[in-house]
């Protein structure tokens, strides 16, 4: 505590003391009250009788289940029965948003995670205490006696016992105190320090408005839907149109209290070579350097016939298709779910997945945790295109339930974000709840898929493809989306490395790829497969699960007969089609991660070649865009969308290429594993040079992003109300192109990338820092510095020069290595000497600008 705070506290206690002394009239009033009370006690000397549960629940309806509830039929207030049998036992709490607003990051279907809690009795109170599940102690080890040291339980609530039935061992408590507050989970997101005061935020929880909407009680789980109301007397930002009244916002949450499953489920521990979601557990009694007992998330599949090579499971994973599913898509969706049965068959299970239709008159809600539901929503500001969460028993990793949320936006030409050219950024800033971010289960595959599909549509339209072709592309895209989201619900996380499976030639061979997964796994975010020769177009997307998916399901679900059998399966990880790298390894954000094969929006084992092909395709499409997308009688909105879509694909392609500069391939094989190599191998000089040449030509050249000039006249949004009040409506072409170029520069000039180039020179990197930096200077200046410089290149050259200056004197300069700083200084001096004041007036002004920037910066360098 600092001195100022301490003084404030002292002052406060002094004020309180003074208050006590100067309030004699209050004391007098209290005395009077006391006298009155004792008088009545004298008049009525009957002994006080405790009320029974029966007395207190007279006007209530009984709802029997795991935790029996009594709901008052007049006031709606809720009471709950705790029995002696509940005390000291483990229960699971799970919550899911029943309905919310994306403004607050709380959207329909969002899972809020599960925790273990115990119910305890403390004198005349009942406590709800959350349990720590992060550590394991071998009970055989003496140190396990101190297993509670330095960990904290969480006492979520303490509630007074209102009545006690000694014979039955029952306690009645007021449940409103539990559920009308954020007792079990934090619903309102915290406000981050430094966030804009203009940003939307929820008001305070209003206890009088918050209510329990429904209660469903079963033998093994008790479920409540609570509508939390957040109120504020006045708001600066009333939120999006999805919010009816910014001063009163409702977030509806399903709470489930679940009995700890009592079954023969055997936990499976994680392996770094396969990508499952896990609950991290550390063995505090182990002495090795990897004391991990991380629990794999998976369903409890048991063979009906344990001896049979392939058997049906005792209980299959059953999916219910919500009755709101568009009729024309039901068959494709079913097919997407059942594709996984191919993988389960290789793990010894037949019909592991089953799909059923929710009847129109079903008496259960799609949010009921007892049903795994394929759900549909059409939200304002959809937070995803698809989302496949599952919830687990934190003690064992067993998946208890799952849902798949699909957004109708997938079928529409609506765009996720207003500024489509910022899609790459938007992906990173995806507005998901903190839980999703923390648990890495957020999936923006739907976004990527939707962008891919819009591009596919634009391509089919501009190249005169048939309606049948269009329908096929859309169907394949839906199938791939469903397989991907189902994969998440089986416990699998992303595999962004899987797109390395085939060569560009194989992908362009329609007979070869027919019916196959185009990548090693449907869990990748690959680009859409397109052949520049349209006559040769085969499959656009994965239509079946991939070899990695089959292998991962074998690891997760096969009943292994011995440890050796499991090790042998894991040792196959070095087979090329089984490579794996997830979101933590992927290079989508500048400067993040190191292996260029783990990337999104890429395809084939020659990402550079494939990306160049995509750029050529986009450039050729640009000229036809105007005739295909400007339709008589309509506004220019569609044309504008097509333009940004094509530019976006081009930007993605150059980003994919840029990741090879300073890239290092990662191999997670264990020591001595057959087919394995050393963990780190730098990208070859040849490939880094190839990438640099492609960037020079397709990202930085004077004509790199130019489009037919007559297109610029038409990039107009349709006017809507006063929509242009916030910004002018003319296309911001230079800003758009510079953003694409800066995305590339912010990766290749990131302090992580530059440091890695220097470090990896020690272990095999032949593209030295000095060569790369010299090549980059040439790419940005050589073509035109001696003559006229066009407006795009002026913009790029100034921005690049400022980046070099920032490396030396900017806020982030301390993060750069001295080697990188020396090269930045060297390059600036080179630019200074190159920038002779020549060319037309505009070019002279530009070069003067460059010289002034550098002269001023050099004075600052210390
Ligand atoms: Zn995903």
Image (cartoon, helix red, strand yellow):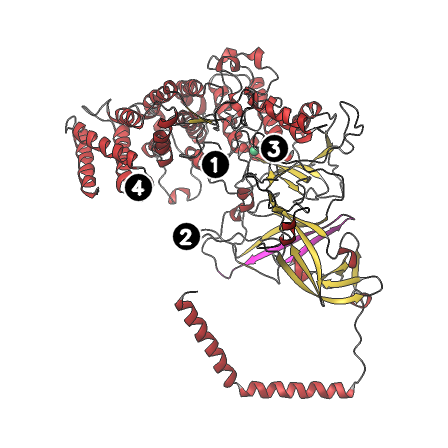
Q: Nearer the viewer, residue 243 or 17?
A: 17
Q: In this rendering, would 844 be left or right of 404?
A: left
- Which sits earlier in the primary sequence, circle 4 or circle 2? 2
Residue range corresponding to the magenta coloring: 209-234
Q: Between tags 4 and 2, which lies in front?
A: 4
Q: CA distance from mark 4 to mark 1?
A: 27 Å
> Could you tell me if the residues under marks 4 and 1 are in contact, i.e. CB atoms within 8 Å?
no
Q: Which of the two discs, 3 and 4, labels the residue nearer the N terminus?
A: 3
Tell me the SS state at disc 2. loop
Answer yes or no: do the residues labelled 3 and 2 have beta carbons within 8 Å? no
Picture disc at residue 492: 3
Which of discs 3 and 2 lies nearer the camera? The answer is: 3
* Mark pair 3, 2: CA separation: 35 Å
Q: Earlier in the sequence, mark 1 or mark 2?
A: 2
Q: Quadrant of the N terminus?
A: bottom left
Helix, strand or loop status at disc 4: helix
Q: Which mark is residue 813?
A: 4
């Amino acid at each position: 505590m600092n001195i100022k705070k301490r003084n404030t506290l002292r002052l406060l206690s002094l004020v309180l003391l003074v208050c006590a002394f100067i309030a004699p009239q209050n004391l007098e009033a209290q005395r009077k009250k006391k006298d009155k009370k004792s008088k009545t006690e004298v008049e009525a000397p009957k002994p006080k009788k405790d009320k029974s549960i029966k007395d207190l629940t007279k006007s209530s309806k009984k709802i029997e289940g795991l935790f029996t509830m009594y709901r008052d039929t007049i006031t709606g207030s809720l009471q709950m029965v705790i029995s002696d049998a509940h005390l000291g036992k483990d229960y699971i709490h799970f919550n899911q948003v029943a309905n919310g607003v994306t403004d607050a990051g709380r959207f329909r279907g969002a899972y809020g995670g599960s925790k273990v809690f115990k119910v305890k009795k403390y004198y005349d109170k009942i406590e709800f205490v959350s349990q720590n599940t992060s550590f394991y102690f071998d009970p055989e080890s003496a140190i396990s006696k101190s297993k509670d040291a330095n960990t904290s339980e969480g006492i979520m609530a303490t509630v007074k016992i209102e009545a006690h039935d000694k014979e039955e061992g029952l306690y009645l408590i007021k449940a409103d105190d539990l559920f009308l507050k954020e007792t079990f989970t934090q619903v309102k997101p915290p406000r981050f320090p430094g966030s804009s005061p203009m940003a939307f935020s929820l008001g305070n929880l209003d206890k009088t408005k918050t209510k329990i909407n429904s209660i469903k009680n079963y033998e093994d789980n008790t479920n409540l839907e609570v509508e939390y109301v957040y109120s504020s007397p006045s708001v600066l930002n009333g939120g999006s149109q999805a919010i009816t009244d910014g001063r009163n916002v409702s977030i509806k949450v399903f709470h489930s209290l679940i009995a700890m499953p009592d079954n023969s489920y055997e936990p499976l521990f994680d392996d770094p070579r396969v990508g499952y979601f896990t609950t991290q557990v550390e063995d505090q009694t182990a002495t090795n350097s990897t004391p991990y007992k991380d629990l794999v998330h998976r369903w409890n599949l048991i063979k009906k016939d344990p001896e049979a090579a392939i058997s049906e499971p005792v209980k299959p994973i059953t999916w219910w298709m919500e009755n709101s599913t568009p009729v024309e898509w039901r068959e494709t969706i079913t097919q997407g779910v059942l594709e996984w049965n191919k993988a389960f068959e290789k793990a010894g299970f037949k019909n592991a997945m089953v799909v059923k239709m929710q009847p129109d008159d079903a008496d259960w809600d799609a949010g009921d945790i007892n049903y795994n539901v394929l759900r549909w929503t059409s939200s304002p500001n959809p937070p995803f295109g698809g989302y496949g969460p599952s919830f687990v028993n934190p003690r064992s990793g067993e998946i208890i339930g799952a849902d798949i949320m699909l957004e109708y936006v997938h079928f529409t030409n609506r765009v996720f974000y207003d500024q489509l050219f910022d899609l790459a950024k938007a992906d990173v800033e995806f507005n998901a709840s903190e839980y999703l971010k923390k648990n890495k289960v957020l999936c923006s595959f739907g976004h990527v898929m939707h962008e891919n599909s819009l591009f596919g549509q634009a391509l089919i339209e501009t190249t005169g493809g048939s309606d049948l072709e269009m329908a096929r592309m859309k169907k394949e895209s839906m199938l791939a989306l469903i397989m991907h989201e189902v994969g998440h619900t089986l416990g699998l996380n992303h595999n962004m490395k899987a797109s390395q499976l085939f060569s560009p030639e194989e992908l362009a061979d329609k007979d070869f790829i027919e019916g196959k997964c185009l990548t090693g796994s449907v869990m990748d975010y690959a680009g859409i497969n397109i052949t520049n020769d349209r006559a040769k177009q085969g499959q656009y997307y994965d239509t079946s699960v991939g070899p990695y998916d089959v292998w991962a399901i074998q690891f997760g679900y096969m009943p292994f007969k011995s440890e050796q059998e499991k090790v042998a399966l894991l040792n196959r990880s070095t087979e090329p089609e089984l490579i794996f790298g997830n979101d933590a390894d992927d290079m989508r954000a500048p400067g993040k991660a190191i292996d260029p094969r783990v990337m999104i929006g890429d395809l084939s084992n020659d990402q550079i070649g494939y990306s160049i092909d995509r750029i050529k395709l986009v450039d050729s499409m640009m000229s036809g865009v105007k005739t295909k997308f400007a339709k008589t009688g309509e506004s220019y909105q569609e044309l504008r969308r097509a333009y940004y879509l094509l530019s976006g694909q081009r930007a993605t392609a150059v980003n994919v290429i840029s990741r090879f500069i300073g890239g290092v391939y990662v191999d997670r094989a264990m020591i001595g594993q057959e087919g394995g190599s050393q963990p780190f191998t730098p990208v070859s000089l040849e490939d880094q040079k190839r990438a640099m040449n492609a960037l020079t030509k397709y990202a930085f050249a004077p004509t790199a992003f130019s489009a037919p000039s007559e297109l610029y006249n038409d990039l107009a949004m349709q006017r809507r109300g006063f929509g242009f009040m916030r910004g002018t409506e003319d296309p911001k072409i230079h800003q758009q192109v510079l953003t694409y170029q800066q995305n590339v520069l912010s990766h290749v000039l990131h302090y992580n990338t530059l440091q890695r180039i220097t470090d990896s020179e020690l272990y095999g990197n032949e593209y030295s820092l000095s060569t790369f930096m010299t090549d980059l200077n040439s790419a940005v200046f050589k073509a035109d510095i001696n003559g006229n410089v066009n407006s795009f290149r002026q913009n790029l050259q100034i921005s690049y020069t400022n980046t070099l200056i920032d490396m030396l004197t900017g806020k982030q300069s301390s993060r750069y290595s001295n080697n990188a700083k020396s090269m930045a200084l060297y390059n600036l001096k080179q630019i200074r000497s190159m920038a002779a004041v020549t060319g037309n007036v505009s070019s002279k002004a530009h070069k003067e600008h460059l010289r002034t920037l550098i002269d001023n910066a050099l004075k600052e360098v210390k």
